[in-house]
Amino acid sequence: MRDCFDLANYYLIRNQNEGCGDVITSTKLQRLVYYAQVFALSLLGKPLFNEKIEASPDGPVIRALKLRYRYYKNGPLPVPPVKIDMSKFTPDEAAILDKVHRIYGQYSGWKLREMACSEHEELQQKKDACQGNTFMLTDTLTRWHKSELGQFAQRH
């Protein structure tokens, strides 16, 4: 199975290849990977990666990504010197990565942080697989996100 770094590489490389103009910071990358996981769980019923998503004051965080990019703070992240290996993803998973990029890639890291934090407050109230400050998006949360995705689709 892929790990969160496969998704991170996808977003970093795609952003550079498309010349999006906006850099990807650690905050923005965290949220793009988080939203890809949410979409996959809600739409496909399975995760894209196994790393846990943790509750933090700044919203949901994937610790492995946080550790890898901690020295960059709010600066631009480097583009990895690899090609995107799309064979790691099914066509449905690749479509989710693309959709998350098209919907959320336009926002700054701070805007995405605000969006995820407001959702995170509701997730915190509904979390059902909790150990310390770590939670996984399980059935209850996936149902909540399906409802949210339905409302989002109607607005956009």
Image (cartoon, grey):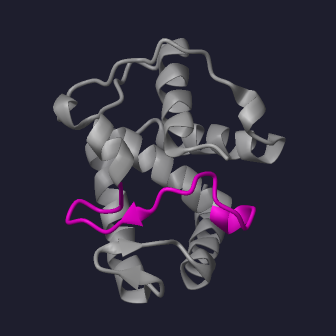
Q: Residue at x 47, y 87 (%)?
A: 128
Magenta segment's dominant SS is: loop
- On the image, the x and y values in percent for residue 134 come to 36, 72
The answer to whether residue 10 of the structure is visible from this angle is yes
- On the image, the x and y values in percent for residue 89 come to 74, 39
Q: Residue at x 20, y 29 (%)?
A: 72
Is 130 displayed left or right of 67 in the figure? right
State whether residue 51 is above or below residue 145: above
Q: How many marks?
A: 0
The answer to whether residue 74 of the structure is visible from this angle is no
Q: Residue at x 33, y 69 (%)?
A: 118
Is 152 displayed left or right of 112 in the figure? right
- On the image, the x and y values in percent for residue 49 come to 58, 52
As for residue 58 lying within the magenta part, the answer is yes
- On the image, the x and y values in percent for residue 70 come to 21, 37
Which residue of the protein is positioned furthest toward the right in this rendering? 91
Is 130 displayed left or right of 56 in the figure? right
As for residue 42 lying within the magenta part, the answer is yes
Q: Residue at x 30, y 53 (%)?
A: 113
State whether residue 142 is above or below residue 76: below
Q: Which residues are magenta?
A: 41-62
Q: Quick one: quadrant of the C terminus?
A: bottom right
Quadrant in the rendering for residue 60: bottom left
State whether residue 46 is above or below residue 109: below
Quadrant in the rendering for residue 133: bottom left
State whether residue 22 is above or below residue 125: above
Q: Nearer the viewer, residue 57 or 111?
A: 57
